[in-house]
Amino acid sequence: MVGQRTLHKPLSLLLLTPLCLLHPGALGQPHLTRRAPNNEEATSIQGVRGGSVELACGSGPTPLVIFWSFTPLGSLIPQPVAVTNGAESKVEAGASALGAVSLWNRSLVLQELQEGARGHFLCQALHAAGGQLHTTYAYLTLAVLVPVSKPQVRLSDPSPVEGTSAVATCAVREGTEPVTFAWRHQAPRGPEEDLVEVTEQSLQLDPVNRTHLGWYVCSAHNAVNWLSSDGTFLDVIYGPDTPVITVEPLGLTEEGFWASEREEVTLSCRAASNPPCHYVWLRDHTQVHAGPAYLIASASRAHTGLYTCLAHNSRLDTRSQSTVRLTIYYSPEGQPSCSVLPTLGAVSLACTWPGGLPAAQLQWEGPQGIGPAAVSNVTWSRTAPQLPNGGVFTCAGQHPALALPALCRIALWEPLRSPTCWTTAIAGDQFIMLSCEWPGGEPRAVLSWLDGQQQPLGTASPSLAIHLLRAQEDLAGREFTCRGTHPLRVPDPHCQLQLEAPQVAVAKPWVSVLEGGEARLGCALLGGTPPVQLLWLGPQRRQVDAGPSGFILHSEGAQLHLSIRAAEPARHGGAYQCVARNALGNSSRSVLLEVLRYPAPPNVTISRLTYGRHRREVQLQWAVQGPGNLTGFLVQRRPSAPSPGAGAWETAATDIEPESRGRRLGGLDPGVRYAFRVLALNHHTAGHPSEVKIPADPPFSAYPAVLGAAGTGVVVATVASLLVFQYAARHPGTIPWSKVITIGIRGQTLRNGQLGSPQGIGLLCLGLFFKGIEPPPTTPDVEPAQEAMDAPVNVTITVTATP
């Protein structure tokens, strides 16, 4: 009955009941009890701040009342938290310091767990069993864990100088112990690395060096979480170290670096330094550039020298420097030069290529293999059996400044054919020069002159040999030999020549030509060594030269021709001499030139000279007396006058063929009376002029008046004739003398029996009209059309009377 009454008590009174149940001595002074009731160990539970935890209050039958209390760490006074009787529950207001407290069945649930919940929880459960009330206890210890906060790296010196010390601390604001630390380091241009040896909160850097430069990250973790800090940069100040100089393109020598002439060269300087240092370049102690790289766009020999790189750290005001030697290599000028020198039974192949830095390396190579090598100059001697005709020998020149070797080649070959000999006279024919040539070949052939006893004259020379002899008569007939030697030609070839005085001949000893014609004189050289000078001497014994005087000289091989144009008897006639001269003597032959007078053209007489109508033209005919070489005729005219010298003759016609014997001349003035004459022409001159004649008037020159009178006469004659013929027809016996009348007009004949007809009368009238008109004489040179137009109709009237 007691338990039932208890259940019906208010919940506020039930919260006080457990205080009496905590311990038998609860009514006295409170005391610390570390043991759970009934000597049971407390249950340990962990929770995380901000999280949730469930505290279970044992197991078994459902109790009448459950009361939860909390004793903070370091305190002995329990604090009520919550109570429930199954139907309703009550949570103390002060329990909010533990978090969001709620009851679920017999468990106490703490959400949004606070650090204040760290301590001891006691669960008291009131049970009714067998009419008795008894209490059970559950003793729990709650540990509230706090996550570590985000760490932060703190540096004792963010920019330490190399060699000093620095401390990096991983600061954590909160976190349940134990807290473990880890460190990571990342260089500016390197991968991140873990510092596995360091697990402390502080990182000792003593002494600091440049490898410590970079980003530092620390990590902190406990039983709850793991967090890493942001990176913090440790800027280690150092340098500059001794600069390192590099050259591109890279060429190494014992003294430093080398580069080719006209090549782009870059000198780079790098010195380890923080902050980066400033660079200055010196060439032979003179500043040439500021910056880490010095570019030479086109290297020349003047760029050879010592190059110093100065590095300066402005932060520490420290300096360092390095010096290297740069040598500009340049190849020798041009190409290697190959030459070959003949020796007795062998040749020496020489290859030279002087200059350059360094000197070029030369090496011979031939058909049989590799030859000797040397610097700048190399010679290779080869015997004649080892020298094939056409064999090629190559000299290769190697130089560092050249990508490919420079080559020169020599092809050995013997000269073609054989030596050629000739002679010339010099110094006014005082000396005779013996010349011998054998061009071509490699090496060049060696030539030497020998006398008739095969004794050498002078010294031998390559390709061309010359020997001088003083000109004298006893040299005529002597022989000289030129011998050539070449390592590829066996036996030695030679050529010979014999000195001799000149001989000359002429084509014709006597030449005849007409005046004004062209005379040709020929002269031929029959022999002579040394070379002979051919010339012509005129009748006055002077040398004939080509010029305006009409002489033309034409040389053709060993012949010298002399042409004389427009020959004149007094000027060009006479004896000519062809003279041949050389240093050993003279020879001459004569040619007699006879210039004959040119025959004059034949005389001309005028056979007919008459005016045409209107007196504006004349018809001229002439005849030639005797033969002659005619080329044409010339007609001249002038106004006629009483005296012979009145007026000058002017040309009326010139282009008249030699076969013509007549010409019609127009363009005359009718008011002027002219006189004409004719001259015959040939190639050289004009003949005597013909007699002077004045043109005769043509018959019936009053031609219009005659026509008018003729017309009137025709009318009168026609009337009279009609009367007469009519009477005669009617009285034929009264006119006994009129026997036959024949009228012929252009081949038609009318007899007297036909006179009475109209046709006969008409023809008679026309006959009477045309009877008085005489036709002009026919001219052979007159065109037929003109003659037909000007000549009247030929009418013939024949009257025959019979008694």
Image (cartoon, rainbow, N blue to C red):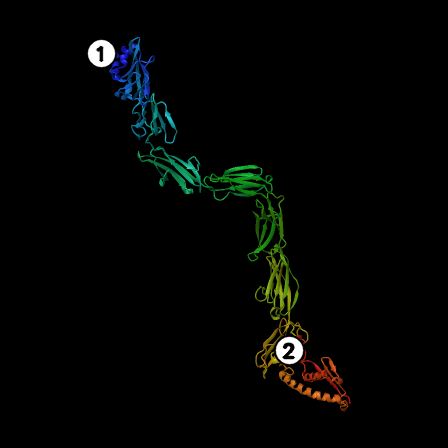
Q: Earlier in the sequence, mark 1 or mark 2?
A: 1
Where on the picture, by quarter, is residue 600? bottom right
Q: Which mark is residue 777?
A: none
Camera-nearest residue between 216 and 694: 216
Mark 1 and mark 2: Cα distance apart in space: 197 Å
Q: Quadrant of residue 160?
A: top left
Q: Which mark is residue 620?
A: 2
Which quarter shows the C terminus?
Answer: bottom right
Of 445 and 212, the residue lying toward us: 212
Rendered position, 715 above or below 686: below
Q: Amino acid at mark 1?
A: Leu
> Viewer-nearest of labels 1 and 2?
1
Seen in the image, is 318 located left or right of residue 759?
left
Residue 651, image x, y percentages: 59, 75
Screen quadrant of the N terminus: top left
Q: Amino acid at mark 2?
A: Leu
Determine which residue is flagged by label 1: 27
